[in-house]
Image (tube, grey):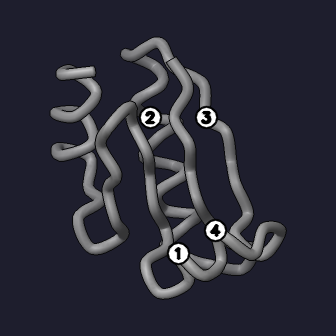
């Protein structure tokens, strides 16, 4: 499974979220595809005010909802 991680450089919240994802990788089988929103106009317009954003299958989790417990819950359902 691939998790899409929408982020930008020099974003402390993005760094924290990446660390959470790396922790979860120890127990769950997935790869992380980092997508810098500044490299794609569509991503930038869609997620500019929401990053970090994690997409797991049909679930899109916005920065305000990102935490270890919720990410693990979504991964267990995927």
Instruction: Give above or below for 66 relative to 34.
Output: below
Q: Disc 2 and disc 1: Cα gap in Å?
A: 27 Å
Disc 3 and disc 4: Cα gap in Å? 17 Å
Tell us which disc is closer to us: 2 or 1: 1
Q: Which mark is residue 23?
A: 2
Q: Is residue 7 left or right of residue 47?
A: right
Q: Residues within 10 Å of mark 2 (few under 14, many from 20)?
A: few
Q: Are marks 3 and 4 in contact (CB under 8 Å)?
A: no
Report the mark closest to the observer, 3 or 1.
Answer: 1
The residue singled out by tag 1 in the image is: 46
Between the C-alphas of marks 3 and 2, the distance is 12 Å
In this figure, which residue is indicated by the disc labeled 4? 43
> Where's residue 21, x and y in %?
47, 40
State whether residue 55 is above or below residue 30. below
Looking at the image, tell me whether mark 3 or mark 2 is earlier in sequence order: 2
* Mark nearer the N terminus (2 vs 1): 2
Distance from disc 1 to disc 4, alpha carbons, whole Å, reads 5 Å
Q: Which residue is mark 3?
A: 32
């Amino acid at each position: 499974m691939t998790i899409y991680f929408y982020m930008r450089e020099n974003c402390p919240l993005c760094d924290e979220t990446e660390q959470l994802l790396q922790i979860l990788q120890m127990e769950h089988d997935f790869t992380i595809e980092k997508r810098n929103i500044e490299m794609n106009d569509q991503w930038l317009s869609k997620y500019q005010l929401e990053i970090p954003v994690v997409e797991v299958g049909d679930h899109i989790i916005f920065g305000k909802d990102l935490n270890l417990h919720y990410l693990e819950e979504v991964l267990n359902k995927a």
